[in-house]
Image (cartoon, rainbow, N blue to C red):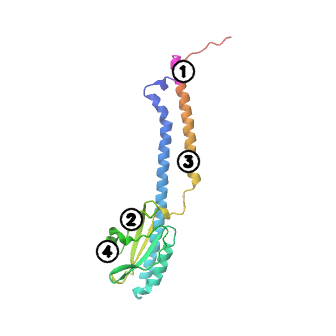
């Protein structure tokens, strides 16, 4: 009991509470890491789809570049129909990029050409990836992971299509089950309450010990 009344050692009783706090922080970190992993997986899926489309277009160099337009439009419109996924195709007309796909506006109108960093990237690279942050109307800020590709690569700069796909954390359909989070927080809450109750009980016992000035043993009557 003297341990409970030591000037410094008594604070060791708070270790279970500290552990619970660290456990809660770790759980939040783990959830973010899982969400980031699912976002990366979604991004890889869209990137692979665009890369496969590019490979198919480049596989027939004997065709004129404009003969691929119908397939490119169909593929990118299919991507754009996916939940919270951006997909678009452009072609050069009189030196300007013109959108040739129909858009599904689930959130708000988004045009990567409005962002200087994207324009600079497509001028210097045949394909690439970048992240653009924007806030849709009446919604929260998000970061859109974009992947772009010029095709067909066997044609000149003015005889190519620019295709762009993008995902954000809102594109993830599969969510972490609610019961996982509920179970975690409920178990931590119960553990905290039990620990708090035990700490209060032990502190009271320590106080009684001090008031009695050590162990007091009562003689039993024979």
Tell me which label, 3 or 4, sits earlier in the chain. Answer: 4
Contact? badges 1 and 3 (CB < 8 Å): no
Marks 2 and 4, Cα distance to the nearest angstrom? 17 Å
Is the residue 146 above or below the residue 70 in the image?
Answer: above
Marks 3 and 4, Cα distance to the nearest angstrom? 49 Å
Q: Residue furthest top?
A: 222
Residue under label 2, please give it: 132
Q: Is residue 209 magenta?
A: yes
Marks 1 and 4, Cα distance to the nearest angstrom? 79 Å
Q: At numbered mark 2, what does the secondary structure look like: helix, strand or loop? A: strand
Residue under label 3, please give it: 184
Tell me which label, 1 or 3, sits earlier in the chain. Answer: 3
Using a 10 Å C-alpha cutoff, classify the residue at mark 3 as few (fewer than 14 neighbours), some (14 to 19) or many (20 or more): few
Q: At numbered mark 3, what does the secondary structure look like: helix, strand or loop? A: helix
In this picture, residue 94 sits left or right of residue 209: left
Contact? badges 3 and 4 (CB < 8 Å): no
The mark found on residue 208 in the picture is 1
Is the residue 63 above or below the residue 213 in the image?
Answer: below
Give the image location of residue 148, x and y in percent. Answer: 39, 72
Provide the residue span drawn in magenta: 205-213
Marks 2 and 3, Cα distance to the nearest angstrom? 34 Å
Q: At numbered mark 1, what does the secondary structure look like: helix, strand or loop? A: helix
Tell me which label, 2 or 4, sits earlier in the chain. Answer: 4
Figure quadrant of residue 117 = bottom left
Give the image location of residue 45, x and y in percent. Answer: 48, 69
Residue under label 4, please give it: 123
Contact? badges 2 and 4 (CB < 8 Å): no
């Amino acid at each position: 009991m003297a341990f409970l009344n030591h000037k410094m050692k008594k604070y060791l009783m708070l270790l279970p509470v500290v552990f619970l706090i660290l456990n809660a922080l770790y759980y939040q970190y783990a959830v973010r890491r899982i969400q980031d992993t699912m976002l990366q997986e979604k991004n890889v899926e869209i990137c692979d789809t665009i890369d496969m489309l590019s490979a198919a277009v480049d596989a027939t160099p004997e065709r004129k570049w404009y003969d691929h337009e119908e397939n490119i439009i169909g593929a990118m419109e299919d991507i754009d129909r996916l939940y919270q996924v951006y997909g678009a195709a452009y072609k050069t007309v009189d030196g300007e990029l013109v959108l040739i796909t129909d858009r599904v506006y689930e959130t708000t109108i988004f045009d990567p050409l409005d962002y200087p960093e994207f324009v600079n990237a497509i001028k210097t690279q045949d394909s690439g990836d970048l992240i653009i942050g924007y806030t849709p109307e009446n919604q929260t800020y998000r970061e859109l992971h974009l992947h772009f590709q010029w095709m067909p690569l066997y044609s000149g700069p003015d005889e190519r299509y620019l295709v762009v796909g993008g995902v954000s954390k809102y594109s993830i359909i599969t969510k972490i089950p609610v019961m996982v989070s509920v179970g975690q927080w409920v178990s931590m809450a119960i553990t905290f309450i039990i620990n708090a109750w035990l700490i209060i009980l032990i502190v009271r016992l320590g106080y009684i010990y001090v008031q009695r000035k050590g162990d007091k043993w009562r003689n039993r009557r024979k």
